[in-house]
Amino acid sequence: MALAHERVFGQRSGARGEPAPYKAYIETYGCQMNFADSELVARILHSIGYGFTSQPEEADLVLLNTCAIREHAEEKIWQRLKYFHSLKRRRPHLVVGVLGCMAERLRQKLLAEAPVVDLIAGPDSYRHLPQLLRQVEGGHKAIHVLLSREETYADIAPLRVSPHKVNAYISIMRGCNNMCSFCIVPFTRGRERSRPWTTIVEEAKSLAEEGYKEIVLLGQNVDSYRDGAVDFAQLLARVAEAVPEVWIRFATSHPKDMRDEVLETIARYPNLTPYIHLPVQSGSDTVLARMNRGYTAQWYLQRIEAIRRYLPKAVISTDIIVGFCGETEEEFRETLALMEAVEFDAVYQFMYSERPGTLAARRYKDDVPPAEKKARLEQVIQLAQTLSLKRHRAQVGSVQEVLLERPARKNPADLAGRTFSGYPVVVRDAAEKYKLGTKIPVHVTSATPATLIGYVANDN
Ligand code: 5AD
Ligand code: SF4
């Protein structure tokens, strides 16, 4: 998705010294953290005079903020680089940069195999972008991929470009100290570090003043957030108190670290939403051990029990990897069984993709044939849809508060949003009467595996 902004924010000295508006185009791939990072990058570029465009064809600087989590994510970038290569033939002054996790992981290969790339910056290097751009202007390739133990960009206010100003991300920590054997993130994003809680509360307050209605707190593993005496439960409480009118969500939790205090805190504050994304990855203890996840299926089920005890209306979603090294048919069936036991509201499923340098790549064989991975993925998708539909149907007939977030995709008369607990909702015939950002009671009248559907309650 592109970071789209048509407005030219500023002026920057042109090649011959006269002022000329330089336009940047930023394309973002991967997780929510990357989208949040692109907003930091946008602020940094803005501060040195760049404007922005949603058309790469009219940009002077193209930045790709990349993901390395699966091979497919990287393949897409190589394709895009081919396109920008052709663009550069027409616009020789165009500067092309690769940011993010793939830049960190593949800097050598990018330098060697993608001559179109002028600039390479890893996730902890964005503060250096102004110098790096000057280096490129001087005719050199610029590269900065050092990981940091301290960088949290706490003092840089993201430049948010969402056209609707309803939801905003705040990243509360960076990096990851868990060594899940399949995962490249600890290598591309480095050691875990938490951002000072006061800066998070300040950012939340200024977002509330700007009119944002929902804030998502982001971290690779939010349960291990810590700033002095303030842990994640306390951070949630402080943010909830600072912006009582704003709904607060967060991601991602880790089953081995998620504590009852967090659940108890969510239950205590009316603006902390009971939406929990709790990646399980597999339902088999032997696979979980090979994945180095630090819990068993039974432990996971107990965490689900705790969520339901504290938060009876919780919406629970998960990530599942199929076809991990050595996964037998029987081990895979245990994943399906766990899905049925939990009845997830939503599942994000992936085929295992070996990432060079990870523990799994060094230790195990990627031996489940691609066709088998695909067949297992299909089964997970099927079951996930059945379970979502069941959960969604149970909401039919209820009236729930919904935050209107954006126009609906299919019908321009409808708006799309989420219930407080996190269910996606299409609100019929709301576009004419209601503004985005409004919270309204919605009568849920039907459901699909993907969404609830309803009408504004008592709408005359
Ligand atoms: N292959 C497939 N899926 C992966 N994920 C992380 N690493 C890999 C990999 N090597 C998935 C996990 C994680 C989500 C963000 O991406 O399910 O929770
Ligand atoms: Fe990767 Fe595991 Fe860290 Fe998530 S918790 S980013 S899966 S190492």
Image (cartoon, rainbow, N blue to C red):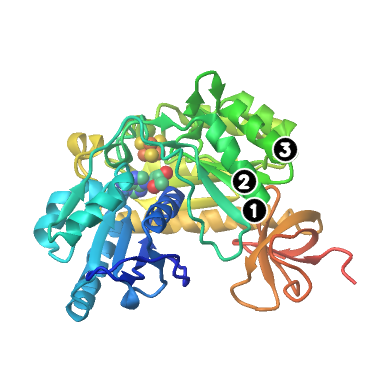
Q: Nearer the viewer, residue 396 or 173?
A: 173
Q: Nearer the viewer, residue 119 or 413?
A: 119
Q: Is residue 95 left or right of residue 198?
A: left
Determine which residue is flagged by label 1: 210
For residue 62, what is the image quadrant?
A: bottom left
Q: Nearer the viewer, residue 305 or 257?
A: 257
Determine which residue is flagged by label 3: 312
Q: Give, as a three-letter code, the residue at label 3.
A: Pro
Determine which residue is flagged by label 2: 206
Image quadrant containing the N terminus: bottom left
Percent coordinates x, y for residue 116 in the rendering: 16, 66
Separation of residues labelled 2 and 1 (CA atoms): 6 Å
Percent coordinates x, y for residue 128 in the rendering: 28, 46
Question: Within 10 Å of the Cα at label 2, are there few (<14), some (14-19), or many (20+) other Cα atoms?
Answer: few
First in sequence: mark 1 or mark 3? 1
Question: Within 10 Å of the Cα at label 3, are there few (<14), some (14-19), or many (20+) other Cα atoms?
Answer: few
